[in-house]
């Protein structure tokens, strides 16, 4: 059972990404007790998986490190990883919440020495790199993980491999007897900042994701470019490990489509342009083509769009690609569609294709929950008549990191006002 006591003057933040961390810090630094729960084994959310993010194109650790330090120094914040909310009942100012904790099999004594990983023989798909490589079943989630503590995959908890990991640990940090537990909270307000998932590109069957190795998604490209990614920061073709010479980005892969996501996620165009800069800096001779319906680059980010357009090796074609097929011998990909500016047929070959998939909000998906409002696409909306639970960041609207920080600050203020009203 978790050692945590809360009252109806406390605030619960669900989700430990940039939005959740921001909301928790703003509320705590205003003097309120905060509990933050995160389903992953680390805080930081999707931002930790980025190589660079807007608007400064800097690595995510420069912003996360400061926030993690603020959290460490603030006694009013308690956080739990590998934790999920399974029940919410009550009303504004008086919520009862149930939280489920999954076993980590590693306790606070862990020093990250890595001895458990050295002796572990079992390998699993690396979730941090979207399964593009393997890791040991005793692992550190990523090199800047917070908390900096190893995890044992449940698949080895009752095996000889698990026992070897325990025997190798000099600090008695591995506890194979850990079990799933639950605990209850009483809080006055809730900030739902559970983030987003990339749309499942395999559902867009005519693009061949999952069937053709050299069709990847935008989030996978981000990991390929990262020095901590599956290829050590080299963007390589998954099928044969070769350097790509001719790369296509297909915008709105499943987005603005009534059969998939009917809305625009807003940031996908900019993400693809950012990825094109990764490629062009790494491979000066690489040709890049972006197939788009409309380019969304609003406000200050339009300057970035203008700069990218100046690259002679990058071409924008207004087109909705209808189909992607593979040359089985070479692994190259044939794209077919129509140039909607000229009416001409598009039939072009590339050695790597990147699908710009949209953002799917993580809704409040539990059996018992008070009434909350969503828009027609499943994003949380603010309804003054249903105060007490507030969306923050990408559960409320698809947006970039900087906007998530602003939105989360607003959500924290609303949560504080809920408590004040009671």
Image: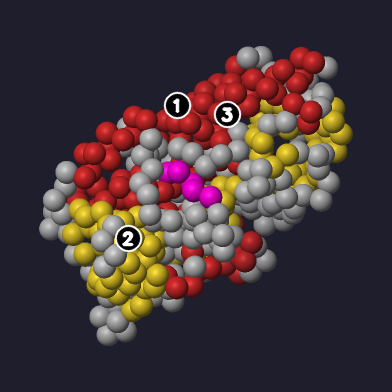
How many numbered markers are drawn? 3
Tell me the distance, in whole angstroms, between the alpha carbons under discs 2 and 3: 39 Å
Residue 421, given in percent of the width and then of the height, sits at: 79, 15
Name the residue beneath numbered marker 1: 66
Could you say whether the residue bearing mark 3 is in a helix, strand or loop?
helix
Q: Give the quarter of the image for residue 88.
A: top right
Where does the C terminus fall, quadrant-wise?
A: top right
Task: Judge from the rendering whether residue 378 lies leftward or rightward of residue 180; answer left or right.
Answer: left
Q: Is residue 129 above or below residue 391?
A: below
Pointer 2 and pointer 1: residues touching (CB < 8 Å)?
Answer: no
- Residue interval drawn in magenta: 263-267
**Going by the picture, which residue comes out furthest to the bottom?**
329
Residue at x-position 66% and y-position 47%: 376
Residue 304 location in percent, x, y? 27, 37
**Observer-nearest of 78 and 120:** 78
Q: Which residue is mark 2?
A: 340
State the SS at label 1: helix
Q: Secondary structure at mark 2?
A: loop
Q: Residue at x 15, y 54 (%)?
A: 313
């Amino acid at each position: 059972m978790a050692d945590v006591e809360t009252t109806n003057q406390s605030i619960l933040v669900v989700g430990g990404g940039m939005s959740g961390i921001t909301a928790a810090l703003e509320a705590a630094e205003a003097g309120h007790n905060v509990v933050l729960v995160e389903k992953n084994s680390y805080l930081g959310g999707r931002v930790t998986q980025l190589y660079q993010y807007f608007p400064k194109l800097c690595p995510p650790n420069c912003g996360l490190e400061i926030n993690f330090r603020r959290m460490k120094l603030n006694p009013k914040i308690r956080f739990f990883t590998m934790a999920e909310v399974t029940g919410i009942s009550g009303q504004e100012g008086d919520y009862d919440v149930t939280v489920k904790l999954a076993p980590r099999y590693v306790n606070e004594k862990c020093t990250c020495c890595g001895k458990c990983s050295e002796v572990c023989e079992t390998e699993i798909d690396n979730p941090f790199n979207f399964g593009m490589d393997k890791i040991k079943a005793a692992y550190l989630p990523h090199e800047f993980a917070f908390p900096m503590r190893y995890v044992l995959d449940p698949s080895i908890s009752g095996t000889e491999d698990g026992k070897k990991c325990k025997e190798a640990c000099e600090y008695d940090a591995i506890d194979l007897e850990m079990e799933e537990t639950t605990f209850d909270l009483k809080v006055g307000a809730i900030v739902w900042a559970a983030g987003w998932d990339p749309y499942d590109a395999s559902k867009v069957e005519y693009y061949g994701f999952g069937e053709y190795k050299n069709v990847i998604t935008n989030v996978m490209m981000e990991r390929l470019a990262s020095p901590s990614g599956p290829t050590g920061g080299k963007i390589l073709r998954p099928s044969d490990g070769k350097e790509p010479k001719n790369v296509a980005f297909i915008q709105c892969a499943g987005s603005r489509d009534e059969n998939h996501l009917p809305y625009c996620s807003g940031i996908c165009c900019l993400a693809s342009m950012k990825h094109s800069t990764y490629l062009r800096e790494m491979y000066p001779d690489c040709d890049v083509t972006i197939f788009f319906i409309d380019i969304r680059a609003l406000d200050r980010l339009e300057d970035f769009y203008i700069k990218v357009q100046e690259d002679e090796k990058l071409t924008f074609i207004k087109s909705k690609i209808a189909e992607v097929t593979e040359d089985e011998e070479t692994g190259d990909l044939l794209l077919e569609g129509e140039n909607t500016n000229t009416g001409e047929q598009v039939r072009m070959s590339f050695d790597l294709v990147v699908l710009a998939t949209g953002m799917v909000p993580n809704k409040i998906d539990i059996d018992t929950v008070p009434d909350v409002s969503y828009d027609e696409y499943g994003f949380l909306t603010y309804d003054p008549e249903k105060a007490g639970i507030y969306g923050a960041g990408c559960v409320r609207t698809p947006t970039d990191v900087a906007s998530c920080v602003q939105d989360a600050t607003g959500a924290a203020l609303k949560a504080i006002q809920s408590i004040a009203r009671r």
